[in-house]
Amino acid sequence: MRILVIEDDKSIAELERDYLEINGYECDIASDGETGLNMALHNEYALVILDIMLPGIDGFELCSRFRAQSDTPVIILSAKKDDIDKVRGLGLGADDYMTKPFSPNELMARVKSHIARYDRLTGNGGSKAGQNKMLKIRELEIDKDSRRVFVSGEEKIMPAKEYDLLLFLAENPNRVFSKEHIFDRIWGMDAIGDVSTVTVHIRRLREKIESDMDNLQYIETVWGVGYRFKG
């Protein structure tokens, strides 16, 4: 299983590579944004570890462009510690955000967690193969076999957690879920973060599936409580 590290600090990149290899992963390293994006888009990786402050294309732009074409898990590992940077990174589709200096053991735990969760979501276990896996709600179609989402026939590319969040809500129509419940359900007990992540992902889902943000057809905010999918 191969992981891509995009990091311009050679010593940090080599530290990450050493710990990944100790834990049984193969590792490629890119030291600038343009090279990293090209490698990420043209090779098969189980996960990408991404710095923000890169030569050429910065990590935010790289994440946005990569996420438009791939749902491979992305962990941002950056010296930028402000909440606004974390929210921006998650809003661009990153699955996780860690700050430097970091614990290599914690990084490995998160790598394993995101890869395992992605494998479960992509159906590598192969269960329930004979069942109807198409969920259709008005103009929204969710193909659970291929994990593809279509709105009015147009495919919408979604990273793993956006897809998992959408499927969870769509399979439980007209029920109100608090942000805390959604966070526990989608990110799990091993997740490190806060419920603001839910807000960011709901906003990104709406941008992809709603045709009119002033007249929401799918994901409704129940003020002071949480969110509800309109069945």
Image (tube, rainbow, N blue to C red):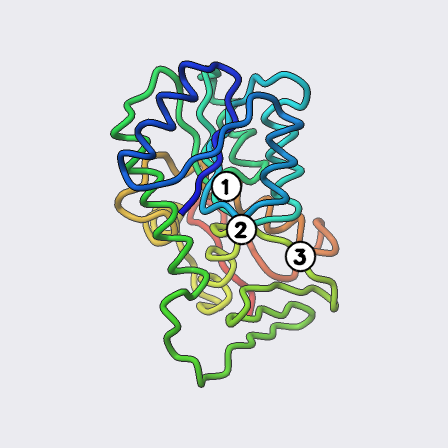
Q: Which residue is mark 2?
A: 221
Q: Which residue is mark 1?
A: 199
Q: Nearer the viewer, mark 1 or mark 2?
A: 1
The answer to which of 200 and 57 lies nearer the viewer is: 57
Across and down, in percent, residue 231 comes to 55, 70
Total marks placed: 3
Q: Residue at x 56, y 36 (%)?
A: 91
Distance in Å between CA atoms under marks 1 and 3: 19 Å
Q: The residue tagged with tag 2: helix, strand or loop?
A: strand
The answer to which of 23 and 222 lies nearer the viewer is: 23
Q: Which residue is mark 3?
A: 156
Q: Residue at x 66, y 72 (%)?
A: 138
Q: Residues within 10 Å of mark 3 (few under 14, many from 20)?
A: some
* Rendered view: 65 above or below 58: below
Please state which amino acid type lies under the numbered disc 1.
Thr
Q: Residue at x 56, y 21 (%)?
A: 31
Q: The residue tagged with tag 3: helix, strand or loop?
A: strand
Q: The residue tagged with tag 1: helix, strand or loop?
A: helix
- Residue 193, by quadrant, is top left
